[in-house]
């Protein structure tokens, strides 16, 4: 670990929770070099590497991520902030970052979106199903790859919903484990829904010690990465109400099986503040 000249911002999120939107927002701040999934994006072979050998035995090979980040920031002004909202952070490179960068220079955003809304997006995108062949490069099966949550034994093959819910619960468990493992790291928790409001974005930037830029207000609330056409092509339909029902049923199964689950602060939607 060495003393850093720059500040780094990373993000813990599940995917389909607004990470690309967050990258766009951060890029509107003054002096921020913000990316969504910077190369190497640490998916595919890196996720497979962790699955087969674990984190400790693959640390050296995964250090390529820090090497590339250092190369990028070497060409940035000394006061610049490097930000990356990649959801692979908590799965394949958080430990490399925390081991090889000065922890005092690292900030981590825990980005959450209403859980049923994320599940609905996962289902309609075909994740954890045969309709989408790309998801295994980006997402692990619950209970694998250094998971923080281990799903209940169902006595049968879990369906798409159960696999997706188990994964989403594991991401939250990983987030909470990260905060326990690195209490010295500056962590900021935020809901995607609140970042649709320009005033809330400005307040969040203040917490991060960032200054809004000329494009920040325009960026706030602008839809990003909706994947509407891709969802039509995959052809899986569901409803938010059914997704909420499946999450409740899954939690009940966990409780009956004696399986611990983390607190899920995003299980309920944000209720708008009537005072505004």
Image (tube, rainbow, N blue to C red):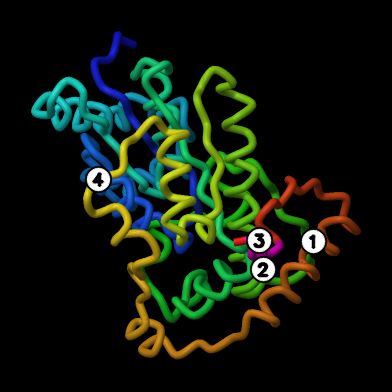
Q: CA distance from mark 3 to mark 1?
A: 34 Å
Residue shown at the point (31%, 37%) measured from the top left: 211
Query: Which residue shows up at 38% across the image and 52% down it?
Result: 22
Residue 105 sits in which quadrant? Answer: top left
Could you tell me how far apart the alpha carbons at marks 2 and 4 are, in whole angstroms? 42 Å
User: Mark 1 packing: few (<14 Cα in 10 Å), some, or many (20+)?
Assistant: some
Q: Which residue is mark 4?
A: 213
| Mark sitting on residue 51 | none
On the image, the x and y values in percent for residue 128 come to 51, 69
Question: Is residue 122 shown left or right of residue 63?
Answer: right
Along the polypeptide, which appears first: circle 4 or circle 3?
A: 4
Q: Which residue is mark 1?
A: 251
Instruction: Tell which of 204 and 268 is nearer to you.
Output: 204
Q: Identify the image quadrant of the N terminus.
A: top left
Sequence-wise, which precedes: disc 2 or disc 1?
Answer: 2
Inter-mark Cα distance, 2 to 1: 10 Å
Q: Nearer the viewer, mark 2 or mark 1?
A: 1
């Amino acid at each position: 670990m060495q003393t850093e000249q720059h500040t780094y911002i990373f993000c813990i999120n599940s995917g389909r929770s607004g990470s690309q939107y967050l990258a766009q927002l951060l890029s509107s701040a003054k002096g921020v070099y913000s990316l969504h999934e910077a190369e190497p994006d640490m998916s595919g072979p890196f996720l497979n590497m962790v699955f087969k050998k674990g984190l400790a035995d693959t640390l050296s090979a995964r250090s390529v991520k820090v090497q590339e980040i250092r190369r990028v920031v070497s060409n940035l002004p000394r006061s610049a902030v490097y930000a990356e909202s990649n959801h692979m952070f908590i799965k394949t490179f958080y430990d490399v970052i925390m081991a090889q960068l000065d922890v005092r220079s690292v900030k981590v955003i825990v980005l959450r979106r209403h859980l049923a809304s994320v599940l609905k997006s996962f289902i309609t995108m075909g994740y954890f199903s045969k309709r989408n062949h790309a998801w295994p490069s980006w997402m692990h099966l619950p209970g694998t790859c250094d998971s923080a949550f281990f799903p209940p034994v169902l006595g049968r093959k879990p369906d798409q919903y159960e696999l997706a819910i188990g994964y989403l619960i594991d991401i939250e468990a990983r987030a909470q484990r990260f905060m326990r493992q690195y209490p010295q790291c500056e962590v900021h928790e935020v809901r995607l829904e609140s970042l649709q409001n320009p005033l809330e974005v400005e307040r969040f930037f203040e917490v991060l010690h960032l200054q809004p830029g000329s494009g920040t207000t325009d960026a706030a609330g602008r839809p990003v990465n909706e994947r509407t056409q891709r969802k039509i092509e995959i052809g899986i339909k569901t409803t938010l109400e059914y997704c909420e029902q499946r999450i409740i049923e899954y939690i009940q199964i966990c409780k009956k099986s004696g399986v611990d689950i983390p607190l899920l602060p995003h299980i309920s939607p944000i209720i708008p503040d009537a005072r505004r």
